Image: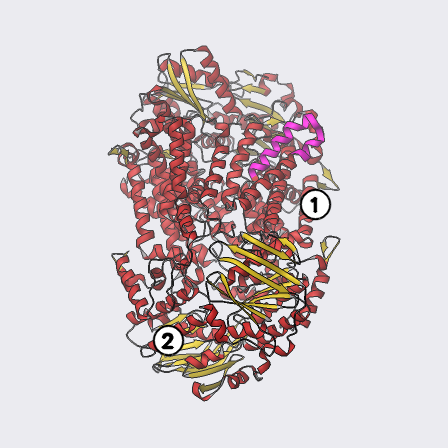
């Protein structure tokens, strides 16, 4: 019903989409996979009307369709759930759901709130969630926000008589396993009324939910498969051009940790977030923390990173008792934090690669108190080569890099600063398979060098695969410990039991 | 006008950096051809001398704007330092200079502390500290202008002189400007300022002492405001609690016309120097061309908007607010 | 799925308390002044406080919308003086033969609204930050009114317009009722219209707002025009109160208005706060000014006292936990 | 006073029809003045701003004089910014090569020295009014610094205070509104008020507040003071008419206009009207029309070597000008000669209003 025919789009002369054709049929879920930079998001934005193609055409039921902005797409029943959390946190749930579509509730120019709230409640009921429509979006969990976004996309049903096309741009990237299941259930239930385009990095998810899968590579569609006719590893090979090996998490390179305890937390608590958490990390050890959203694992990592001072218990770094009041204290103790919000907390996007690499510690490039720009450049070039950062040069602004390369810059910064403790907060979020693999390799290398690593991750496999030990948290408390030596990894099921 | 194409044409970095100086050159040549007598050595020297105080003030604010804040207290601090200089010169002679400048630094630090410790937005924090400082200046001057008598002018006279063919005020501005340029380019403080302005959360996570950097920025701003006040006091041979009034907006305008983003993280002292020159050329040019006195403000406002529209580097500003 | 409940437990209450902080500051201020000088709560004084608050309140209503959007409007003084100038020059006055009565008022509002729309257009079409666009408009507005007034103060002789300040209804001057009307209108716009929502949405996140199909340019221009409308209303009230207009009629009103908005608890970063906050903020600033006179605070230190109290009020009402970053 | 009318007599288009002006205003742009012949001196007026009636009248006086002798005249405004005021003057000096006559009301006391020094260095003749540092003297810059003119602020402040006291019957409370704290005229007028108070023990100064010369601030302050003192306020003393009229409007809002007399300084039209209506007890004016024209006339005469400043007696180098009191006794006559008609001054009578040397204390 919605067809894209030979779409071309370039940015500042660089082609992002080259002659891309896809077709979305009624009542089906179309998967869209590809590495970062393959053009998935651009294609989605063209379909959603926020980007205008340079060439090619969109057809709706065979008729040409011109979308000048998001509102045009909405008028045709095309809605989008964005990769970035796109609710406005200062507005209520109902306001978010009907943002941009308030006209229907206007009476003499005045918004009829009662009607809007009732309508919003109806929308949420459709997908079977119960959220107070007057609550501010900032008070909701990530998962709930995702549901609200889905509900928002579904409002088009009321204004458009034709079946909807809902574009889901990496909706699962911030969700825990349980929430993903809920989302998929909703999508399946809604299939009778709408078509979906589903974009994700996680091949298993795409295969699970989709009927058909398009694979994109370098701005082109390189393959189209029925989901039941292809396996994950095959898809992976098409996507990255190499096979998905069993040694994905580089288990063969997992070495036993050393003896010295680097991080030693005893009964640390932060009221309302976590309590009585004991945690030890040895040199060269990767400690994973598993837990659902709200289990307190994020907050524990934030506490050790210096963002959220613990209010009781003791924290020792290399045997020395510390109490961090700011990340700066933590950095001074050799702790490096690799955040999930790379674009916000990871890098100063407008600064260059070189400047970001030396941000935490300028001492390597300063001589007599003055920054030597030549040294800085050489240092950055060195990292670019060693970590295979794909960039024209060290003076390029970080915002122009892909996610994987940005993550490498963050890691390069902490290695420059000589950090011996790394906190990896969802280190592979938003990265494609190939980039993930490179990050895993780096993490193994660092671990082999004796760096103590604290890891929280999107998926259990990743947590288990990478870690030496896994600690499970629930409701702010530690509920279980598992050893995860190479070749004898714990079972996911056991972990999940401790999580919920 | 399609600014998207314009923008992509300007996406090359050096083109963007070259726009403000180019605008400056066009202005000079334009006014020079409209008003013969403008392009003389004397007039251009006068232009430089007239720009000096504005530039010193603007250079200080530049640092604060780069870290993403704003300092509205500079005119009060400049006035206070002029009062301190005028009060103290007869008593302690040349030592009055460091005393006046130190007072500026102290109040700059105070603004910074109010801003970072009490988390009051800098716009309001400095508005308020500016009020406090203005009150102190009134009190210190006992509510009147204080003349620096002939005995005191022995110590302040050198500022009105010339050195190597250039007025001393121009040298002062140039030295301060060069020093700040080096500080911004070669010290960790300068780097941290840019990082904080361009992405404060990332700067925090990288372990940068954001509070200290901001306080230093405010201290520099206060110190430079005080130096501007001292120069003013020396030029006018007196101090007054209202001496630097009306200098705040031109100073901020100079920073932004130069192409420094009001949101922080982008720009620098060099740009501010160009911006300050543009502001004073426009002002002086209006006198030279003989713009209707009633229309001066209108022309100034329009030129301001146009200058910003031309000089601002839109490719490096995420959201135009 | 697990029922998504508000995930923040303890913080909510504290947050709610913070939200009330400006109101508490206001009450505390009133109480302290009353203890020091009981004249403060005399009805006559309260009426006067209301009267002094009329112009700043009307003005701050307009500014609130701009600040909610995350922008700033420095053209307050320019717009206000334009409106005052148009009013006196078109209504009966001592400088020309015009006597258009209430059409003058309509023209004044139209002029400042148009100037606001122009500001918005400059900002959105030339893509320059509001700070600079409005700074330019400030100079232009001031320049035009100086030009039109020829530098002198023109008296407003139209008795019906003067009645805005002189006639009373239920004890309050009409200007207070007009300001109250402006406040209610602003409330209606913020809480009950699409424009109000969209302004908040832009303040909360411009990109998201755009992706939701909000026409940013249109909303921004409308918001600046709306602000211009309120500035115009304030200009008319100021002209009616002073019985004349000169180019400096608006002097010092910008920073007073920004202060009131911020003291009320509206964030300069946009998206948080609103016109009710601003009402409280205006009252805090006005009561403070009134109180300092009632207590006989020396003019030398009034500025300093005001500065310190502003810092205190803003520091008290800020939610420091939420505000990791303050600019 | 005179000024109001003058402004529109000299600029009829700006006032006669708002619409015509609106059209003109919309297209107003940088209209270049004709370039003048270099051998003729340029007359330059430097004042604070054009946004107050006082200086607007000053400018029309200057223009009337310039028109009478057919010389180019330029007005510079400092907008309250000392730096700009001085910079503009220097730019004019550069432009004219020093062949100019400057009549300046320096923005602030300190500004006078660099202005005079710049003029002397360039060979221009300068007359300053109101503000100059005590240790700056015309005699030190012969022949370029021709004269400095002031009006005795103490005398004016005292004179209006005494009339106010008489108007309220010699006893009771008054409030006073002062100008910008650090301003010389504000300080002197306040001193005059204090002298008058010292001589009238039955009058009580309830409070002295600063309204920075502005009517809008005076309006709010007066309202607040009315609360504090209520009916105890029998009269209002204001250091200028702008503040006085602001106070008057606050009184009017309370139904007190005409009952509580107001006095001020400057003689702006609104104040003269208020004197006629019996709402102002009096106002006293330094006659800015005269100041604007005569300052240039004196400077030009010296510049054209019609007299040698160095040879003039001290009381022509630094003197108090003659202030005119406008009270209900003479207001009708004043209105006829100065407001309804353009005053005709004899610009050749350079020293006619010299009342005596300036106090050194």
The reply to whether residue B50 is visible in this rendering is yes
**Secondary structure of residue under mark 2:** helix
Which secondary structure class fits the magenta region best? helix
Frontmost of labels 1 and 2 is: 2
Q: Which residue is mark 2?
A: A185
A71 or B177, nearer to the observer: A71
Image coloring type: secondary structure
A46 or A332, nearer to the observer: A332
- Residue A403 in the magenta stretch? The answer is no
Which x, y percent locates residue C2?
38, 67
- Residue B86 in the magenta stretch? The answer is yes
C290 or A66, nearer to the observer: C290
The region drawn magenta spans B75-99
Q: Which mark is residue B105?
A: none
Q: Which residue is mark 1?
A: B175
**Secondary structure of residue under mark 1:** helix
Quadrant of the rendering where the N terminus of chain C is positioned: bottom left
Label 1 is found on which chain of the structure? B
Label 2 is found on which chain of the structure? A
B175 or D54, nearer to the observer: B175
The reply to whether residue D347 is visible in this rendering is no
Q: Name which residue lies at 62% across and 18% down.
A: D312
Q: How many marks?
A: 2
Which x, y percent locates residue D44?
55, 34
Which x, y percent locates residue A304?
58, 58
Which x, y percent locates residue A295?
47, 63
């Amino acid at each position: 019903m919605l067809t894209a025919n030979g779409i071309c789009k370039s940015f500042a002369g660089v082609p992002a989409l080259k002659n891309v054709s896809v077709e979305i049929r009624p009542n089906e879920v179309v998967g869209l996979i590809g590495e970062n930079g393959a053009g998935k998001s651009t294609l989605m934005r063209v379909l959603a009307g926020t980007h205008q193609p340079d060439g090619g055409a969109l057809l709706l039921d065979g008729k040409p369709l011109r979308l000048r902005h998001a509102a045009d797409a909405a008028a045709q029943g095309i809605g989008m759930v964005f990769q970035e959390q796109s609710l406005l946190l200062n507005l209520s749930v109902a306001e978010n759901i009907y943002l941009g579509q308030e006209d229907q509730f206007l009476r003499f120019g005045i918004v009829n709130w009662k009607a809007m709230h009732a309508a919003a409640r109806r929308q949420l009921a459709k997908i079977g969630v119960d959220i107070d429509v007057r609550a501010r979006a900032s008070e909701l969990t990530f998962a709930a926000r995702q549901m609200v976004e889905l509900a928002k996309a579904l409002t088009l049903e009321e204004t458009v008589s034709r079946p909807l096309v809902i574009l889901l741009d990496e909706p699962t990237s911030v969700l825990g396993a349980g929430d993903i299941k809920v989302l998929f259930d909703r999508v399946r239930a809604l299939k009778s009324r709408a078509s979906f385009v589903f974009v994700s990095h996680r091949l298993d998810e795409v295969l699970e939910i989709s009927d058909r899968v398009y694979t994109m590579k370098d701005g082109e569609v390189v393959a189209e498969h029925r989901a039941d006719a292809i396996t994950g590893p095959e898809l992976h090979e098409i996507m990255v051009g190499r096979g998905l090996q069993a040694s994905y998490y580089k288990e063969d390179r997992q070495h036993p940790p050393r003896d010295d305890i680097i991080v030693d937390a005893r009964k640390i608590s932060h009221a309302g977030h976590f309590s009585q958490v004991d945690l030890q990390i040895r040199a060269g050890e990767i400690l994973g923390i598993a837990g659902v959203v709200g289990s307190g694992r994020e907050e524990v990592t934030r506490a050790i990173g210096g963002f959220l001072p613990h209010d009781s218990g003791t924290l020792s770094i290399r045997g020395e008792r510390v109490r961090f009041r700011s990340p700066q204290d933590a950095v001074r103790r050799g702790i490096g934090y690799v955040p999930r919000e790379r674009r916000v907390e990871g890098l100063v996007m407008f600064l260059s690669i070189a400047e970001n690499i030396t941000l935490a510690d300028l001492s390597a490039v300063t001589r007599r108190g003055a920054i030597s720009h030549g040294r800085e450049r050489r240092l950055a070039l060195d990292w670019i080569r060693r970590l295979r950062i794909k960039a024209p040069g060290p003076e390029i602004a970080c915002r122009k890099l892909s996610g994987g390369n940005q993550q490498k810059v963050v890691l390069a910064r902490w290695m420059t600063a000589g950090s011996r403790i790394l906190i990896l907060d969802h280190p592979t979020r938003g990265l494609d398979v190939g980039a993930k693999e490179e990050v895993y390799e780096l993490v193994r290398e660092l671990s082999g060098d004796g760096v103590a690593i604290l890891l929280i991750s999107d998926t259990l496999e990743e947590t288990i695969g990478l870690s030496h030990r896994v600690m499970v948290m629930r409701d702010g408390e530690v509920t279980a410990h598992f050893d995860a030596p190479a070749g004898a990894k714990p079972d996911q099921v056991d972990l999940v039991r401790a999580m919920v | 006008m399609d600014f998207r194409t314009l923008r992509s044409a300007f996406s090359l970095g050096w083109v963007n950096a070259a726009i403000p100086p180019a605008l400056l050159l066009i202005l000079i040549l334009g006014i020079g051809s409209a008003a013969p007598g403008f392009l003389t050595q004397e007039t251009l020297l006068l232009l430089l001398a007239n720009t000096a105080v504005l530039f010193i003030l603007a250079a200080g604010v530049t640092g604060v704007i780069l870290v993403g804040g704003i300092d509205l207290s500079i005119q009060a601090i400049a006035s206070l330092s002029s009062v301190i200089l005028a009060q103290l010169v007869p008593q302690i002679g040349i030592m009055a200079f460091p005393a006046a400048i130190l007072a500026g630094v102290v109040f700059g630090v105070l603004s910074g502390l109010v801003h970072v410790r009490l988390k009051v937005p800098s716009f309001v924090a400095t508005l308020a500290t500016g009020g406090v400082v203005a009150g102190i200046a009134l009190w210190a001057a006992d509510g009147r202008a204080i003349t620096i008598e002939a005995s005191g002018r022995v110590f302040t006279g050198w500022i009105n002189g010339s050195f190597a063919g250039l007025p001393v005020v121009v040298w002062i501005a140039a030295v301060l400007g060069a020093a700040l340029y080096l500080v911004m380019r070669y010290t960790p403080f300068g780097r941290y300022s840019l990082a904080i302005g361009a992405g404060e959360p990332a700067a925090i996570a990288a372990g940068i002492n954001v509070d200290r950097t901001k306080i230093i920025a405010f201290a520099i701003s206060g110190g430079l405001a005080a130096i501007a006040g001292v120069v003013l006091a020396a030029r006018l041979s007196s101090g007054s609690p209202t001496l630097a009034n009306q200098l705040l907006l031109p100073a901020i305008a100079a920073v932004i016309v130069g192409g420094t983003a009001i949101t922080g993280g982008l720009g620098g002292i060099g740009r501010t120097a160009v911006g300050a020159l543009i502001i004073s050329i426009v002002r002086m040019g209006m006198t030279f061309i003989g713009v209707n006195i009633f229309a001066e403000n209108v022309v100034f406002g329009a030129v301001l908007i146009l200058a910003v529209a031309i000089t601002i580097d839109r490719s490096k500003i995420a959201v135009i607010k | 799925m697990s029922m998504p409940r508000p995930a923040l437990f303890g913080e909510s209450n504290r947050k709610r308390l913070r939200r009330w902080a400006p109101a508490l500051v206001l009450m505390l201020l009133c109480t302290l002044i009353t203890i020091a000088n009981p004249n403060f709560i005399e009805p006559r004084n309260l009426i006067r406080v209301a009267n002094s608050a009329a112009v700043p309140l009307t003005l701050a209503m307009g500014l609130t919308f701009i600040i909610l959007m995350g922008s700033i409007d420095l053209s307050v003084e320019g717009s206000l003086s334009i409106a005052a100038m148009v009013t006196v020059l078109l209504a009966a006055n001592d400088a020309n033969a015009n006597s258009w009565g209430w059409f003058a008022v309509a023209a004044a509002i139209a002029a400042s609204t148009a100037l606001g729309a122009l500001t918005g257009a400059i900002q959105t079409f030339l893509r320059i930050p509001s700070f600079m666009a409005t700074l330019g408009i400030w100079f232009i507005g001031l320049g035009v009114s100086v030009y039109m007034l020829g530098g002198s103060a023109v008296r407003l002789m139209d008795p019906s317009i003067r009645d805005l300040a002189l006639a009373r209804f239920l004890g309050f001057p009409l200007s207070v009722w007009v300001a109250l009307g402006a406040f209610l209108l602003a409330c209606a716009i913020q809480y009950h219209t699409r424009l109000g929502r969209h302004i908040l949405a832009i303040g909360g996140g411009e990109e998201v707002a755009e992706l939701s199909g909000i026409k940013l340019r249109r909303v921004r221009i409308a918001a600046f025009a709306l602000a211009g409308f309120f500035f115009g209303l304030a200009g008319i009230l100021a002209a009616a109160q002073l019985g004349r207009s000169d180019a400096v009629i608006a002097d010092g009103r910008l920073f007073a208005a920004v202060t009131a908005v911020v003291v009320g608890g509206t964030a300069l970063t946009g998206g948080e706060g609103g016109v009710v906050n601003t009402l409280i903020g205006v009252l805090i600033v006005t009561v403070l000014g009134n109180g300092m006179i009632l207590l006989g605070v020396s003019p030398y230190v009034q500025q300093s006292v005001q500065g310190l109290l502003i810092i205190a009020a803003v520091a008290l009402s800020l939610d420091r936990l939420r505000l990791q970053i303050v600019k | 006073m005179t000024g109001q009318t003058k402004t529109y007599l000299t600029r009829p288009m700006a006032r006669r029809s708002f619409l015509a002006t609106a059209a003109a205003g919309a297209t107003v742009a940088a209209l270049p003045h004709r370039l003048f012949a270099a051998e003729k001196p340029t007359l330059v007026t430097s004042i604070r701003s054009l946004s107050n009636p006082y200086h607007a009248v000053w400018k029309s006086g200057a223009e009337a004089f310039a028109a009478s002798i057919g010389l180019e005249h330029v007005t510079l405004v400092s907008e309250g910014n000392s730096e700009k005021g001085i910079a503009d003057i220097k730019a004019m000096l550069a432009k004219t090569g020093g062949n100019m006559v400057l009549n300046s009301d320096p923005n602030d006391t300190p500004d006078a020295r660099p202005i005079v020094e710049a003029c002397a260095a360039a060979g221009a003749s300068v007359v300053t009014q109101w503000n100059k540092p005590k240790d700056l003297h015309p005699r030190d810059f012969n022949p370029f610094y021709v004269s400095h003119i002031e009006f005795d602020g103490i005398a004016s402040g005292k004179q209006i205070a005494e009339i106010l006291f008489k108007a309220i019957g010699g006893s009771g409370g008054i409030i006073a509104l002062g100008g910008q704290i650090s301003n010389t005229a504000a300080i002197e007028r306040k001193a005059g008020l204090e002298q008058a108070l010292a001589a009238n023990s039955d009058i009580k100064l309830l409070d002295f507040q600063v309204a920075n010369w502005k009517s809008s601030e005076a309006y709010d302050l007066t309202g607040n003071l009315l609360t504090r003192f209520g009916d105890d306020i029998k009269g209002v003393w204001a250091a200028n008419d702008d503040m006085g009229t602001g106070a008057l409007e606050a009184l009017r809002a309370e139904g007190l206009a005409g009952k509580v007399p107001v006095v001020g300084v400057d003689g702006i039209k609104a104040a003269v009207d208020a004197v006629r209506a019996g709402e102002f007890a009096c106002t006293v004016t330094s006659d800015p029309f005269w100041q604007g024209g005569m300052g240039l006339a004196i400077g030009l005469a010296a510049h054209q070597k019609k007299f040698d400043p160095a040879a003039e007696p001290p009381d022509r180098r630094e003197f108090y000008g003659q202030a005119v009191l406008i009270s209900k006794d003479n207001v009708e006559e004043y209105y006829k000669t100065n407001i309804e008609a353009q005053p005709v001054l004899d610009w050749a009578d350079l020293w006619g209003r010299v009342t005596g040397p300036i106090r050194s204390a």
